[in-house]
Every structure is written in structure tokens, then in C-alpha cells.
Amino acid sequence: MFDLLKKDYSVISPASGKVLELSEVPDEVFANKLAGDGVAIDCSGDTIVSPADGVLTIIFKTNHAFAVTLDNGVEILVHIGIDTIQVDGEGFQRIAKEGSRVKAGDPIIKIDREIIKEKGFSLITPVLIVNGDRVKNIDKNVGVNVSAGEDIIFTYKTK
């Protein structure tokens, strides 16, 4: 009954593309939800944006992943591509500053799709809640095409 009083939070797509179930990601860590729960985007754009309002708590040194901590304490990880740490930052350009406050849709990373694809890496981008113990009822919007910074990819309630 008290669940009715809990707020629904929305996470928007950090990338343009098609929303996939994590089970469709060609990496066991993501497919088996070992790093967190959420969805993946089969990325078709070149600008990766913040999926929600919060603090940009980390941008990996190679710029292939970043995390945003929301005001409700939920941490969202955006991992651009699969095994893209191996390109050592080539094809990834940092736009935002680590530690800064961001709004949903603010540009974080610009990618050069051609460089990444030429090196043989997938641009499927997992978007995960990494501290799932803080949330429940993740409702995923899979199988649809979304635009970066515009469309909701999942909603959730906090515990």
C-alpha cells in the first residue's frame, strides 16, 4: 500500500539507437547482470549524454564509461560499447568534467564511431543501475528506437 507513495523515477537514453534487453549484450558480465540491472542501447549516434540529473561522479580514464550519482542515491553506469577499454581512449572525447553537476541530456562523451568500429568493437552500450539494492520495480522500455537525451529507457522506484 505504501508503494503508492513512492515516486517513479525515469532514466532517459544516453545514446540514440535501439533499446535491448541486457541478455542480448555480447558480454557475459552485462548479459548476466553482474555489473547491475538496466538495458543496453545499440548505439547509432555519436554523442553520449547524461541519462538523468545528478553528479558526474566518475569518467573512466579511457573515456569509455562514466557514472552519474542521482540525488536519490542511485548510481547509473553508462558503458559505451563492449570491450572498448581496449582502444585506450582512441575514438572517445570527454566533453563534461568529472565531479560536475549534470542534467539529463547534457553531453558527456563524443565518440568517433568509425574508429571504434574499424577496430572491431561493438557500440552496444549498457546503461545500468549499479546499486540495485536501492531500487525495485525496474520497468524497461525495450525493443524501441530512442533518441539521446529525449526518450525514457526505464523507470524505477526506490526502496
Image: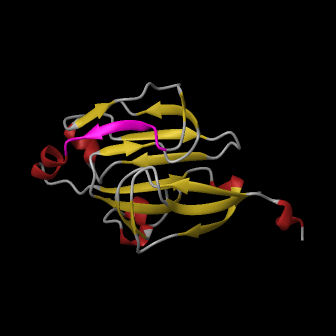
Image coords of residue 123 (percent x, y): 27, 55
Taking the spot 40% from the left edge, 36% from the top edge, the residue there is 108
Whether residue 136 is visible to the viewer of this picture, yes or no, is yes
Nearer the observer, 130 or 10: 10
User: Which stretch appears magenta?
Assistant: 105-112
Q: Position of residue 14 (x, y in %)?
A: 42, 50
Judged left or right of residue 102, residue 144 is: left
Residue furthest bottom in the image: 143
In percent of the image, x 30 and y 52: which residue is there? 81
Q: Position of residue 62 (x, y in %)?
A: 30, 33
Describe residue 69's horizontal placement relative to residue 60 as left or right.
right
Residue at left offset 36%, top offset 71%: 24
In the picture, which quadrant includes the N terminus? Answer: bottom right
* Quadrant where the C terminus is found in the figure: bottom right
Foreground of the two, 131 or 8: 8
Foreground residue, 118 or 86?
118
Is 109 within the magenta? Answer: yes
